[in-house]
Image: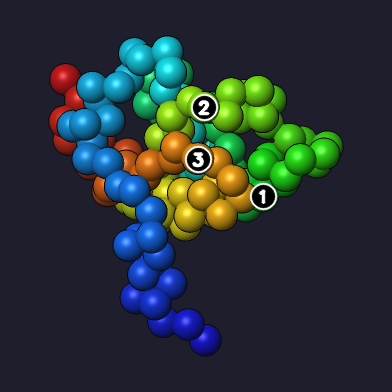
């Protein structure tokens, strides 16, 4: 079995963004926030206009021709995508998956929504 540290080593292969820098992009029409937490967590509150893309189905949202392919990403390949989860682990892995599946401009919020909530007004 992989150790947690080994699993999270992909953090060095993705671009991370601080909650403060992400906040500056909140109203930018060229940026889309993506919440990869479970549906229940998403329904209790998210960041701005974030769309929900459950981490467990991410590859299906991104795969060309999938029955649940996400039109926002498919039709907007040049947008900047900012991914987040609860505390950063799922967001890190989701960001790596998105990058591996061909999403060009994708970043992970360091510390997830927990850190975001510390800086929101």
Camera-near label (2 vs 1) is 2
In the image, 10: left or right of 118? right
Mark 2 is surrounded, within 10 Å at the Cα level, by few (under 14), some (14 to 19) or many (20 or more) other residues, namely few
Label 2–label 3 contact, CB within 8 A: yes
- The local secondary structure at tag 3 comes to loop
First in residue order: circle 2 vs circle 3: 2
Give the residue number, with chain letter if any, for mark 3: 104
Question: Which residue is pictured at 16% across the width and 20% down the height?
Answer: 121
In the image, 118: left or right of 89? left
Give the residue number, with chain letter if any, for mark 1: 59
Residue 6: where, in percent of width, then height? Answer: 39, 77
Camera-near label (1 vs 3) is 3
Determine if residue 38 is in view: no
Residue 1: where, in percent of width, then height? Answer: 52, 86
Q: Nearer the viewer, residue 46 or 84?
A: 84
First in residue order: circle 2 vs circle 1: 1
Tell me the distance, in whole angstroms, between the alpha carbons under discs 2 and 1. 19 Å
- The local secondary structure at tag 1 comes to helix
Question: Which residue is pictured at 21% across the width and 31% down the height?
Answer: 21
Whether residue 65 is situated above or below residue 56 in the rendered picture:
above
Question: Which residue is pictured at 40% across the width and 35% down the height?
Answer: 82
Tell me the distance, in whole angstroms, between the alpha carbons under discs 1 and 3. 15 Å
Question: Which residue is pictured at 57% across the width and 29% down the height?
Answer: 77
First in residue order: circle 1 vs circle 3: 1
Whether residue 71 is situated above or below residue 86 in the rendered picture:
above
Tell me the distance, in whole angstroms, between the alpha carbons under discs 2 and 3. 7 Å
Determine if residue 78 is in view: yes
In the image, 118: left or right of 13? left
Give the residue number, with chain letter if any, for mark 2: 78
């Amino acid at each position: 079995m992989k150790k947690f540290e080994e699993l999270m080593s992909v953090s060095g292969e993705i671009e991370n963004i601080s909650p403060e820098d992400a906040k500056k992009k909140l109203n930018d029409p060229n940026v889309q926030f993506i919440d990869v937490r479970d549906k229940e967590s998403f329904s209790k509150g998210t960041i701005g206009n974030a769309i929900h893309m459950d981490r467990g189905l991410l590859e299906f949202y991104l795969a060309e021709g999938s029955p649940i392919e996400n039109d926002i990403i498919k039709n907007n390949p040049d947008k900047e995508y900012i991914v987040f989860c609860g505390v950063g682990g799922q967001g890190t892995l989701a960001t790596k998956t998105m990058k591996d599946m061909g999403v060009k401009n994708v970043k992970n919020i360091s510390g997830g929504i927990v850190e975001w909530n510390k800086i929101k007004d």
